[in-house]
Amino acid sequence: MARRERYELVFVHPDASAPAAEDITEDIVVVHRTDSSGPGGHPVYADDTGIVRAEISDRAEVRMLASGGHQVHSSTVHARPVT
């Protein structure tokens, strides 16, 4: 199976004061495949700055990877293939 070259990482941020679906915001970061593999053996993808790094499996499962100290990653991240 061919690996995707780019994904959109979708970070979901629900508004704690208003739990309705329309109050959920998303941040999207486009990442591209690097030559590295993550701890699970899947390719590592990074944004153009190299700050956002994620291991993405062939089933689009995301494992965020720290690129520096004291990073705290969102617990709700989804990967969407970019065509």
Image: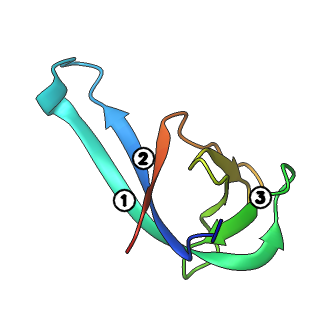
- Say the numbered circle drawn on residue 42: 3
Label 1 or label 3, whichever comes before in sequence order: 1
Q: Quadrant of the N terminus?
A: bottom right
Find residue 80 and report its image quarter.
bottom left
Would you say 17 lies left or right of 5 here? left
Q: Secondary structure at mark 3?
A: loop
Q: Nearer the viewer, mark 3 or mark 2?
A: 3
Q: Amino acid at mark 2?
A: Phe
Label 3 or label 2, whichever comes before in sequence order: 2
Tell me which residue sits at (85%, 56%) in the image: 41
Residue 13 position (above or below residue 9): above
Q: Nearer the viewer, mark 1 or mark 3?
A: 3
Dot 2 corresponds to which residue? Answer: 11
On the image, the x and y values in percent for residue 51 come to 63, 69
Dot 1 corresponds to which residue? Answer: 28
On the image, the x and y values in percent for residue 29 come to 43, 65
Q: Amino acid at mark 3?
A: His
